Amino acid sequence: MPSSTGPATEPPADHRKGPRRRGEELESAILRATLDELAEVGYSALTMERVAVRARTGKAAVYRRWPSRAQLVLDACKLGKISEVDLPDTGGVRGDALALLRQMAATMSSPLGGIMRGLLGEMTRDPELAELIRERIHTVRPLAVHVILERAVERGEVEPWVLTSRRATVATDLLRNQFLLFGAPVEDEVIVDIVDDIYLPLILSPAAPPRGEAG
């Protein structure tokens, strides 16, 4: 007689069944398993054991390559190209800034965006993760926004001191805050407002650096 409690749930898949991988093949499988776990359960619930099961390997194989969960996750994000953008040269700083923010917004609206939002939210609770994100993402040069500003300096649109001022990253910071507070998608109207109403007046108008922004 059929059960009245609904269909029986399937037992969890044993991802360890299947051919064993070694070397780069195994490392790639672990990193992709990490991205899948991040998308499914988020950073807070991700464990090395869950990743190992999904990658069809042992937990020791994961720990040998990545001593901590934070290091594993950041390498997986690099594989997933979460922070990478392909910048066209539009011939002007406004067009370049709009192109950058639109690419970032598209990533935020993709499955990778949920991973990104989760990691940024976890920074306040995981000091190691926060340090790695700052080292590997926010302090890597040249950042996309600095590429845009370097082009603008060469064209004579922006003064060189702007590159090392806090003004340089205002547009991407505002977009990130919008995403964290309100989620995706970020409307194109918001992107245009950030660039036209806030960013361009900050980086185009001043002829000399205000005190404290010279570098």
Image (cartoon, grey):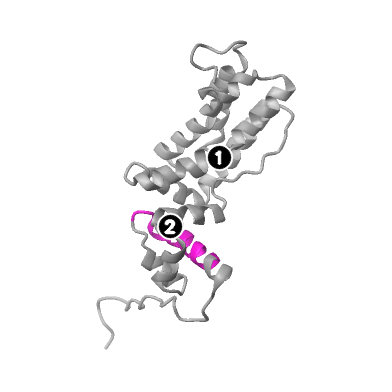
Label 1 or label 2, whichever comes before in sequence order = 2
Q: Amino acid at mark 1?
A: Val
Report the quarter where the N terminus lies: bottom left
Image spot of residue 102 (x, y percent): 59, 38
| As drawn, 107 above or below 16 | above
Q: Residues within 10 Å of mark 1 (few under 14, many from 20)?
A: few
Toward the bottom, the furthest residue is: 1
- The span picked out in magenta is 28-44
Q: Which mark is residue 192?
A: none
Image spot of residue 165 (x, y percent): 54, 22
On the picture, is 14 further left or further right than 157?
Answer: left
| SS label for mark 2 | helix
Residue 42 on the magenta segment: yes
| As drawn, 157 above or below 46 | above
Q: Which mark is residue 140?
A: 1
Image spot of residue 143 (x, y percent): 59, 37
Name the residue rendered at 59%, 11% in the picture.
208
| SS label for mark 1 | loop
Task: State whether the magenta stretch is mostly helix, strand or loop.
Answer: helix
Say which of marks 1 and 2 sits in front: 1
Report the quarter where the C terminus lies: top right
Residue 67 on the magenta segment: no
Q: Is residue 200 visible?
A: no
Q: Which residue is mark 2?
A: 38
Give yes or no for contact between labels 1 and 2 (Cβ–Cβ under 8 Å).
Answer: no
Spatial separation of the CA atoms under disc 1 and disc 2: 23 Å
